[in-house]
């Protein structure tokens, strides 16, 4: 190996190391984080109310019906929900936005409408979190064909994946709620 080739390799190695150091010092997008614990979110949703945790197991048929209604996958047969004695049921959904997770709490009333939506954690960079007003557009909506991006839900420039993931999560929760309330074999879950 000649001196020039050795020098060139050394120079390339030094440049690569310098690039690595610069990238470590360069500003990185701020990651989101955990904003609310489960207990804090439930207290916001149901102040001064009793809340009971219910653990339910979907049958294969319930899971299939919920997935069909949601137009999104239902990955687990296990459903944990929190029923308030003041009215309303809270569900939590953890899903991937791009490569990292978002956790939302959705509270559903007796008519199957969204009455509260809270972002509990968002681990993607903060610039991909829509404004609160974007999340508020889900309030009072039911599961129907209009509960989709570019229909009842406005898209978000620069946060398309977040908008899609959150909309799918709300649809999943509303579908699960609808299926669980209408199952005649579940005690106390019949809709009058």
Image (cartoon, rainbow, N blue to C red):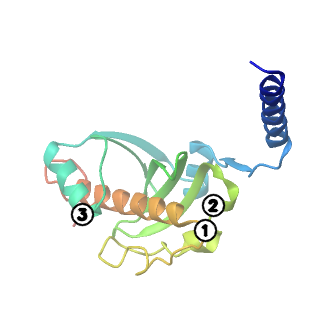
Q: Of the residues under marks 3 and 1, which one precedes in the sequence?
A: 3
Residue 81 picture location, percent across and down: 40, 47
Q: How many marks?
A: 3
Q: Residue at x 52, y 52 (%)?
A: 98
Residue 117 visible, this orientation: yes
Return the mark for residue 113. Answer: none
Q: Residue at x 63, y 60 (%)?
A: 128
Nearer to the camera, 165 or 158:
158
The quadrant of the picture occupied by the C terminus is bottom left
Left or right: residue 119 compared with residue 177 = right
Q: Of the residues under marks 2 and 3, which one precedes in the sequence?
A: 3
Q: Residue at x 13, y 48 (%)?
A: 61
Residue 160 picture location, percent across and down: 52, 66
The reply to whether dot 2 and dot 3 touch (C-beta < 8 Å) is no
Q: Of the residues under marks 1 and 2, which one precedes in the sequence?
A: 2
Question: Can you identify the residue that label 2 sits on?
Answer: 128
Question: Can you identify the residue that label 3 sits on?
Answer: 69
Q: Residue at x 46, y 76 (%)?
A: 153
Question: What is the secondary structure assignment of the residue under circle 2?
Answer: helix
Against 139, residue 165 (above or below) is above
| Mark whose residue sits in front, 3 or 1 | 1
Distance (Cα) linking label 1 and label 2: 7 Å
Residue 33 picture location, percent across and down: 67, 46
Local crowd size for mark 3, using a 10 Å CA cut-off: few (<14), some (14–19), many (≥20): some
The reply to whether dot 1 and dot 2 touch (C-beta < 8 Å) is yes
Residue 8, quarter of picture: top right
Question: Can you identify the residue that label 1 sits on?
Answer: 158
The quadrant of the picture occupied by the N terminus is top right
Question: What is the secondary structure assignment of the residue under circle 3?
Answer: helix
Left or right: residue 13 compared with residue 153 = right
Residue 168 picture location, percent across and down: 39, 61
Local crowd size for mark 1, using a 10 Å CA cut-off: few (<14), some (14–19), many (≥20): few
């Amino acid at each position: 190996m000649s001196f020039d080739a050795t020098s060139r390799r050394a120079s390339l190695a030094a440049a690569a190391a310098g690039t690595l150091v610069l990238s470590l010092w360069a500003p990185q997008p701020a990651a989101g984080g955990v904003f609310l614990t489960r207990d804090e979110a439930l207290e916001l949703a149901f102040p001064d109310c009793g809340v009971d945790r219910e653990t339910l197991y979907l049958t294969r048929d319930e899971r299939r019906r919920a997935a069909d209604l949601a137009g999104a996958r239902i990955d687990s047969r296990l459903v944990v929900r929190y029923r308030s004695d003041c009215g309303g049921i809270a569900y939590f959904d953890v899903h991937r936005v791009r490569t990292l997770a978002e956790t939302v709490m959705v509270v559903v009333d007796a008519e199957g409408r969204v009455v509260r939506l809270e972002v509990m954690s968002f681990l993607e960079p903060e610039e991909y979190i829509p404004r609160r007003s974007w999340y508020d557009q889900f309030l009072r909506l039911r599961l129907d064909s209009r509960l989709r991006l570019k229909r009842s839900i406005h898209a978000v420039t620069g946060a398309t994946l977040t908008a899609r993931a959150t909309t799918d999560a709300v649809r999943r929760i509303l579908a699960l709620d609808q299926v669980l309330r209408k199952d005649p074999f579940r005690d106390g879950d019949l809709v009058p």
